[in-house]
Image (cartoon, rainbow, N blue to C red):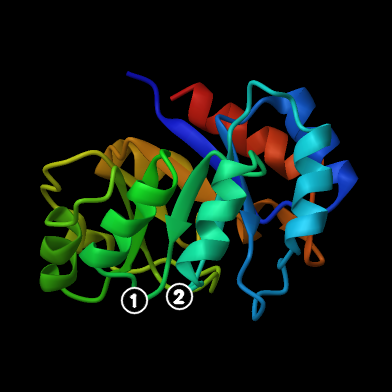
Amino acid sequence: MSVFVKTCGLSRPEDIAAANELRPDYVGFVFWPKSRRYVSPETAAELRAQLDDRIPAVGVFVDAPLEDVAALLRCGTIQVAQLHGHEDETYLAALREQASAPVWKAFKVRTKEDVAKAEASSADLILLDNGYGTGETFDWSLLDGVHRPWVLAGGLSTDNVAEALDVLKPDGVDVSSGIETDGQKDPQKMKTFLNVVRTQ
Protein backbone atom coordinates (compact mmCIF):
# COMPACT_ATOMS: atom_id res chain seq x y z
CA MET A 1 0.00 0.00 0.00
CA SER A 2 1.41 3.37 -0.98
CA VAL A 3 2.13 6.12 1.52
CA PHE A 4 0.03 9.25 1.14
CA VAL A 5 1.44 12.77 1.17
CA LYS A 6 -0.14 15.88 2.67
CA THR A 7 1.46 19.17 1.69
CA CYS A 8 0.47 21.57 4.44
CA GLY A 9 0.38 25.32 4.86
CA LEU A 10 -0.64 26.33 1.36
CA SER A 11 -1.61 29.99 1.34
CA ARG A 12 -1.21 31.46 -2.17
CA PRO A 13 -2.71 30.82 -5.61
CA GLU A 14 0.69 29.72 -6.87
CA ASP A 15 0.79 27.06 -4.12
CA ILE A 16 -2.52 25.74 -5.40
CA ALA A 17 -1.26 25.75 -8.99
CA ALA A 18 1.71 23.62 -7.94
CA ALA A 19 -0.56 21.22 -6.06
CA ASN A 20 -2.85 20.89 -9.08
CA GLU A 21 0.14 19.96 -11.21
CA LEU A 22 1.82 17.60 -8.75
CA ARG A 23 -1.29 16.04 -7.18
CA PRO A 24 -0.41 15.40 -3.54
CA ASP A 25 -2.98 13.21 -1.81
CA TYR A 26 -4.06 16.07 0.48
CA VAL A 27 -3.32 19.75 0.93
CA GLY A 28 -3.58 21.61 4.21
CA PHE A 29 -4.91 25.04 5.12
CA VAL A 30 -3.81 26.36 8.52
CA PHE A 31 -6.53 28.17 10.48
CA TRP A 32 -4.42 28.80 13.60
CA PRO A 33 -3.93 32.58 13.78
CA LYS A 34 -0.53 32.28 15.47
CA SER A 35 0.93 30.44 12.48
CA ARG A 36 2.79 32.36 9.78
CA ARG A 37 0.94 30.09 7.34
CA TYR A 38 -2.47 31.18 8.65
CA VAL A 39 -5.24 31.71 6.12
CA SER A 40 -8.64 33.20 6.86
CA PRO A 41 -11.77 31.19 6.07
CA GLU A 42 -12.41 33.57 3.17
CA THR A 43 -8.95 33.08 1.68
CA ALA A 44 -9.20 29.33 2.17
CA ALA A 45 -12.52 29.28 0.30
CA GLU A 46 -10.92 31.15 -2.60
CA LEU A 47 -7.99 28.73 -2.67
CA ARG A 48 -10.28 25.70 -2.42
CA ALA A 49 -12.20 26.98 -5.45
CA GLN A 50 -8.94 26.95 -7.44
CA LEU A 51 -7.88 23.50 -6.20
CA ASP A 52 -8.44 20.35 -8.24
CA ASP A 53 -11.65 18.75 -6.97
CA ARG A 54 -9.87 15.43 -6.66
CA ILE A 55 -7.51 16.74 -3.95
CA PRO A 56 -9.12 16.89 -0.49
CA ALA A 57 -8.30 19.92 1.65
CA VAL A 58 -7.48 19.44 5.33
CA GLY A 59 -8.14 22.24 7.81
CA VAL A 60 -5.57 22.54 10.61
CA PHE A 61 -6.93 23.90 13.90
CA VAL A 62 -5.64 24.52 17.43
CA ASP A 63 -8.37 24.71 20.06
CA ALA A 64 -10.76 26.39 17.62
CA PRO A 65 -14.44 26.85 18.47
CA LEU A 66 -16.29 23.73 17.44
CA GLU A 67 -18.80 25.70 15.39
CA ASP A 68 -16.04 27.29 13.30
CA VAL A 69 -14.55 23.92 12.37
CA ALA A 70 -17.93 22.38 11.59
CA ALA A 71 -18.93 25.34 9.41
CA LEU A 72 -15.82 25.02 7.24
CA LEU A 73 -16.53 21.31 6.78
CA ARG A 74 -20.18 21.80 5.97
CA CYS A 75 -19.58 24.51 3.37
CA GLY A 76 -16.95 22.41 1.59
CA THR A 77 -13.93 24.66 2.13
CA ILE A 78 -12.28 21.65 3.77
CA GLN A 79 -13.00 17.93 3.65
CA VAL A 80 -11.03 16.85 6.75
CA ALA A 81 -10.49 18.46 10.18
CA GLN A 82 -7.01 18.09 11.69
CA LEU A 83 -6.89 19.04 15.38
CA HIS A 84 -3.64 20.08 17.07
CA GLY A 85 -4.80 21.47 20.40
CA HIS A 86 -6.37 20.10 23.56
CA GLU A 87 -9.48 18.79 21.82
CA ASP A 88 -10.78 15.84 23.84
CA GLU A 89 -13.04 12.91 23.02
CA THR A 90 -16.14 14.98 23.78
CA TYR A 91 -15.02 17.57 21.23
CA LEU A 92 -14.39 14.90 18.60
CA ALA A 93 -17.82 13.34 19.16
CA ALA A 94 -19.57 16.71 18.98
CA LEU A 95 -17.73 17.63 15.78
CA ARG A 96 -18.82 14.38 14.16
CA GLU A 97 -22.42 15.17 15.09
CA GLN A 98 -22.25 18.60 13.48
CA ALA A 99 -20.29 17.67 10.36
CA SER A 100 -19.97 14.25 8.78
CA ALA A 101 -16.29 14.23 7.84
CA PRO A 102 -13.01 12.56 8.84
CA VAL A 103 -11.38 13.90 11.98
CA TRP A 104 -7.62 13.64 12.42
CA LYS A 105 -5.90 14.30 15.74
CA ALA A 106 -2.27 15.35 16.11
CA PHE A 107 -0.18 14.43 19.13
CA LYS A 108 3.10 15.98 20.22
CA VAL A 109 5.46 13.07 20.89
CA ARG A 110 7.93 13.30 23.76
CA THR A 111 7.43 9.96 25.51
CA LYS A 112 6.06 6.47 24.92
CA GLU A 113 3.03 7.58 26.93
CA ASP A 114 2.28 10.21 24.29
CA VAL A 115 2.23 7.49 21.65
CA ALA A 116 -0.06 5.31 23.76
CA LYS A 117 -2.44 8.25 24.23
CA ALA A 118 -2.50 8.79 20.48
CA GLU A 119 -3.26 5.14 19.82
CA ALA A 120 -6.24 5.31 22.18
CA SER A 121 -7.81 8.27 20.37
CA SER A 122 -11.14 7.83 18.60
CA ALA A 123 -9.89 10.03 15.73
CA ASP A 124 -10.12 8.56 12.26
CA LEU A 125 -6.38 9.07 11.85
CA ILE A 126 -3.59 10.15 14.20
CA LEU A 127 -0.60 12.37 13.42
CA LEU A 128 2.56 11.94 15.44
CA ASP A 129 4.35 15.25 15.44
CA ASN A 130 7.04 17.36 17.06
CA GLY A 131 4.78 20.29 17.79
CA TYR A 132 3.15 23.31 16.21
CA GLY A 133 4.95 23.63 12.89
CA THR A 134 8.43 23.73 14.39
CA GLY A 135 10.10 22.25 11.33
CA GLU A 136 12.05 19.89 13.57
CA THR A 137 11.92 16.13 13.99
CA PHE A 138 11.44 14.29 17.26
CA ASP A 139 12.84 11.03 18.65
CA TRP A 140 11.59 8.54 16.08
CA SER A 141 12.65 5.60 18.24
CA LEU A 142 9.58 6.29 20.38
CA LEU A 143 7.40 5.14 17.48
CA ASP A 144 8.46 1.52 17.50
CA GLY A 145 5.35 -0.59 16.98
CA VAL A 146 2.47 1.83 16.41
CA HIS A 147 -0.55 -0.44 15.96
CA ARG A 148 -2.99 1.69 13.96
CA PRO A 149 -2.86 3.83 10.81
CA TRP A 150 -0.84 6.97 11.45
CA VAL A 151 0.85 9.94 9.81
CA LEU A 152 4.39 11.15 10.47
CA ALA A 153 4.84 14.91 10.76
CA GLY A 154 7.50 17.28 12.01
CA GLY A 155 10.71 18.24 10.27
CA LEU A 156 10.29 16.09 7.19
CA SER A 157 12.16 17.09 4.04
CA THR A 158 13.61 15.63 0.87
CA ASP A 159 16.72 14.81 2.93
CA ASN A 160 15.12 12.54 5.51
CA VAL A 161 11.75 11.30 4.23
CA ALA A 162 13.21 8.23 2.51
CA GLU A 163 14.80 7.13 5.78
CA ALA A 164 11.57 7.82 7.65
CA LEU A 165 9.59 5.65 5.26
CA ASP A 166 12.13 2.86 5.39
CA VAL A 167 12.50 2.80 9.17
CA LEU A 168 9.05 3.79 10.45
CA LYS A 169 6.69 2.74 7.66
CA PRO A 170 3.96 5.32 8.35
CA ASP A 171 0.72 5.32 6.41
CA GLY A 172 1.20 8.95 5.47
CA VAL A 173 3.61 11.87 5.74
CA ASP A 174 2.80 15.52 6.38
CA VAL A 175 5.26 18.16 5.13
CA SER A 176 5.31 21.94 5.34
CA SER A 177 8.59 23.74 6.09
CA GLY A 178 10.51 21.00 4.30
CA ILE A 179 9.06 22.14 0.97
CA GLU A 180 9.66 25.85 1.54
CA THR A 181 12.31 28.35 0.50
CA ASP A 182 12.48 31.62 2.43
CA GLY A 183 9.19 30.83 4.14
CA GLN A 184 7.21 30.21 0.96
CA LYS A 185 6.20 26.97 -0.72
CA ASP A 186 8.75 25.94 -3.34
CA PRO A 187 7.24 23.97 -6.26
CA GLN A 188 10.54 22.26 -7.04
CA LYS A 189 10.98 21.06 -3.45
CA MET A 190 7.37 19.92 -3.44
CA LYS A 191 7.98 17.96 -6.63
CA THR A 192 11.18 16.39 -5.30
CA PHE A 193 9.52 15.42 -2.02
CA LEU A 194 6.61 13.76 -3.79
CA ASN A 195 8.97 11.94 -6.14
CA VAL A 196 11.02 10.58 -3.24
CA VAL A 197 7.90 9.24 -1.50
CA ARG A 198 6.37 7.80 -4.65
CA THR A 199 9.52 5.93 -5.66
CA GLN A 200 9.99 4.21 -2.29
* Residue 48, position as x, y percentages in the image: 75, 39
Mark yes or no: residue 157 visible: no
- Which quadrant holds residue 190? top right
Q: Residue at x 85, y 51 (%)?
A: 12
Answer with left or right where residue 54 lies relative to residue 189: left
Q: Label 2 amino acid? A: Asp
Question: Which residue is label 1 attached to?
Answer: 86
- State the quadrant of the N terminus: top left
**Quarter of the image holding residue 26?**
top right
Q: Residue at x 80, y 39 (%)?
A: 16
The C terminus - image quarter? top left
Secondary structure at numbered mark 1: loop
The kind of residue on which mark 1 rests is His
Give the residue at x 67% y 35%.
192
Depth order, front residue of 118/111: 118
The secondary structure type at the circle numbered 2 is loop
Q: Residues within 10 Å of mark 1 (few under 14, many from 20)?
A: few
Task: Tell me: 66 left or right of 10.
Answer: left
Q: Looking at the picture, tell me which residue is in the foreground, 126 or 86.
A: 86
Q: How many marks?
A: 2
Q: Which mark is residue 42?
A: none
Asked whether disc 1 touches disc 2, contact meaning CB atoms under 8 Å apart, the reply is: yes
The image position of residue 181, as x and y in percent, is: 79, 59
Residue shown at 42% from the left, 50% from the top: 98
Q: Quadrant of residue 133?
A: bottom right
Along the line of sight, which residue is nearer the eye, 27 or 170? 27
Q: Which residue is mark 2?
A: 63
Locate residue 65, reporting x and y percent. Answer: 50, 72
Mark earlier in primary sequence (1, 2): 2
Q: Taking 6 as reference, is 107 left or right?
A: left
- Residue nearest the viewer, comparing 82 with 163: 82
